[in-house]
Image (cartoon, rainbow, N blue to C red):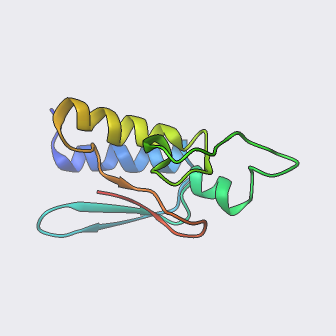
C-alpha cells in the first residue's frame, strides 16, 4: 500500500505473467483495475488439463470448506488463494486483499480486482 496504484498494478501483472505464465488483460474504470487471466496461469491450467487425474494425480482437497471456496475438489495448490487472499485478509483487515474471483469451473478466467 506504500506504492501508488500504477506501480502495484505493474508489479501484479509482472508476477502473473512471469510467475504464473498467465495471459492477461487489464481493464480500468473509475473505481478499480481488473486483471483477467484467461486462462489462469496456474490453477486454471491445472483444471483445464485434468492434472488431478492420472498420470499427474496432483493432490485435491475434496472437502467443502472455505479453503476450497466451499466447493470441494480443488487442487491443493489453489487453496493458497483462499487462504492468502480471502481468509487471512478478512481476519486481519476485514476485506479480501486483493479480491480474487477464482473460476468455479475449468475454462473460466480468473479475475483480480
Q: Taking 90 as reference, is 21 left or right?
A: right
**Residue 52 picture location, percent across and down:** 74, 49
- Outermost residue, front side: 64
Q: Taking 34 as reference, is 37 left or right?
A: right
Of the pair 57 and 32, the residue shown nearer to us: 57
**Residue 33 picture location, percent across and down:** 24, 60
Compared with residue 70, is residue 3 higher up or lower down, i.e. above or below? above
- Outermost residue, right side: 55
Of the pair 27 and 54, the residue shown nearer to us: 54
**Residue 87 picture location, percent across and down:** 34, 37
Q: Taking 34 as reference, is 56 left or right?
A: right
Q: Residue at x 24, y 32 (%)?
A: 91
Q: Quadrant of the C terminus?
A: bottom left
**Residue 47 picture location, percent across and down:** 65, 58
Compared with residue 34, is residue 82 higher up or lower down, i.e. above or below? above
Q: Quadrant of the N terminus?
A: top left
Q: Residue at x 21, y 50 (%)?
A: 6
Q: Residue at x 56, y 64 (%)?
A: 39
Total residue callouts: 0
Q: Residue at x 15, y 43 (%)?
A: 4
Compared with residue 61, is residue 35 higher up or lower down, i.e. above or below? below
- Outermost residue, left side: 30
Of the pair 31 and 8, the residue shown nearer to us: 31
Amino acid at each position: 500500500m506504500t506504492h501508488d496504484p500504477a506501480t502495484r498494478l505493474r508489479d501484479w501483472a509482472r508476477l502473473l505473467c512471469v510467475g504464473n505464465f498467465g495471459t492477461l488483460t487489464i481493464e480500468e474504470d473509475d473505481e478499480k483495475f481488473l486483471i483477467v487471466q484467461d486462462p489462469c496461469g496456474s490453477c486454471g491450467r491445472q483444471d483445464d488439463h485434468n492434472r488431478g487425474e492420472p498420470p499427474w494425480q496432483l493432490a485435491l482437497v475434496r472437502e467443502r470448506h472455505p479453503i476450497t471456496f466451499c466447493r470441494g475438489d480443488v487442487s491443493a495448490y489453489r487453496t493458497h488463494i483462499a487462504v492468502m487472499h480471502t481468509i487471512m485478509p478478512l481476519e486481519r483487515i476485514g476485506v479480501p486483499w486483493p479480491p480474487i474471483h477464482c473460476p468455479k469451473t475449468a475454462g473460466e478466467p480468473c479475475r483480480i480486482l
